Amino acid sequence: MPSRPPTHAFDTATTTLPTLRRGSQLHETERRLNAVLNNASVAIFLMDDRQHCVYMNRAAELLTGYSLSDVLARDCPLHDIVHHTYPDGRPFPLEECAIDRAFPENNQERGEEVFVHKDGHFYPVGFTASPIRDDAARIIGTIIEVRDITEEKAAAERQRLLTNELNHRVKNTLATVQSIAAQTFRGKTDEAARRMFDARMVALSNTHNVLTCENWESASLRSVVESALAPHALAEIDTARFDLVGPDTRLHPKVAVTLAMALHELMTNAAKYGALSVPEGRVSVRWALLPMDDGERLDLTWTETGGPPVETPSRRGFGTRLIERQLPMEFDGSAEINFSPEGVVCRLAIPLTALGWHGQDVVLGRGA
């Protein structure tokens, strides 16, 4: 049967105009999306379910050295084009690739890898790979964001070298001070005082080592405590002599150095006169982090038990003055040493937010 002709001119128009309008809207959306993606500074790759790249923006072409037409012409997984070899020359199998793991494991992957440029040189990248799902929640591909982190790596390495050089020079300075002290003290003081001075220099040096490992941004509270007690703890067969209990946190470098010196003085006194001077003595170091209006406060208690009876000293020595004066003066905290006959008890309270540092929120995991 022949088809019925339209009854008026708008019949044909009404069947084609919506289609044309939808096509025009789709073209405009695609044009805008391409403009956004090509203006982005981060490289963006769109992968299909075979791990083949079906789209890459302008930044991705500049990053890899390949154009989209180059990649499409290869008709293989993108991994085999830009990520096929380890820097040491070993082949890099697709199944070992963390980026491509986002598709089979249905999971977002983040990390760092090393890509191979079209001209053959290697370069480090940071990436985020996320699965793409259709309306039925089935995974149909992967979107990957990649950025070149060569400059970041170089800056971090320069910072590491500078920090190590600073620590080296500080240690040289401490060694020079020890040498000058040795010449000055020779024949003018007893050997015990000389050993005490040297021990304090070593304690200060050990704290610098802890901070160097953290690029002088902050230091682990537990590491500071363990480092301060290490000279005596390492010599002990009975590990139960020390009881360290408390949550870890990050300390400002200035707090770390002063706290380490205070603990060193307490340990030295305990080894000479207190709980550590007899085999049955024990030392407990317990701390807690208490909330304050503007952050946290560290409450730390040093307790000695099982040692000889304690007598209140007739005068305040260097260690006692350091603990009772410097901590409150520098950090607006408090310090109290109780020379109880059963054993020395020292209580410290230090506001940890009185001194902030650049990047503190990131280090403490409070960043956005």
Image (cartoon, rainbow, N blue to C red):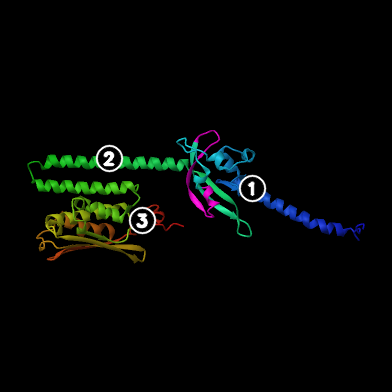
- Crowding around mark 2 (Cα neighbors within 10 Å: few <14, some 14 to 19, many 20+) is few
119 is within the stretch colored magenta: yes
Residues under labels 1 and 3: Cα distance?
Answer: 42 Å
Dot placed on the residue nearer the N-terminal end, 1 or 3:
1
**Residue occupying the point 58% across, 50% down:** 142
In the image, the segment drawn in magenta is 99-121
Residue 56 visible from this viewpoint: no
Compared across the picture, whether 86 is left or right of 132 comes to left
Q: In this view, does 246 lie above or below 53?
A: below
Compared across the picture, whether 19 is left or right of 251 comes to right
Residues under labels 2 and 3: Cα distance?
Answer: 26 Å
Residue 296 appears at what percent x and percent y? 34, 63
Mark 2 lies on a secondary structure that is helix
Q: Is residue 329 above or below residue 95?
A: below
Tell me the residue that label 3 is attached to: 356
Q: What residue type is labelled 2?
A: Arg
Mark 1 lies on a secondary structure that is helix
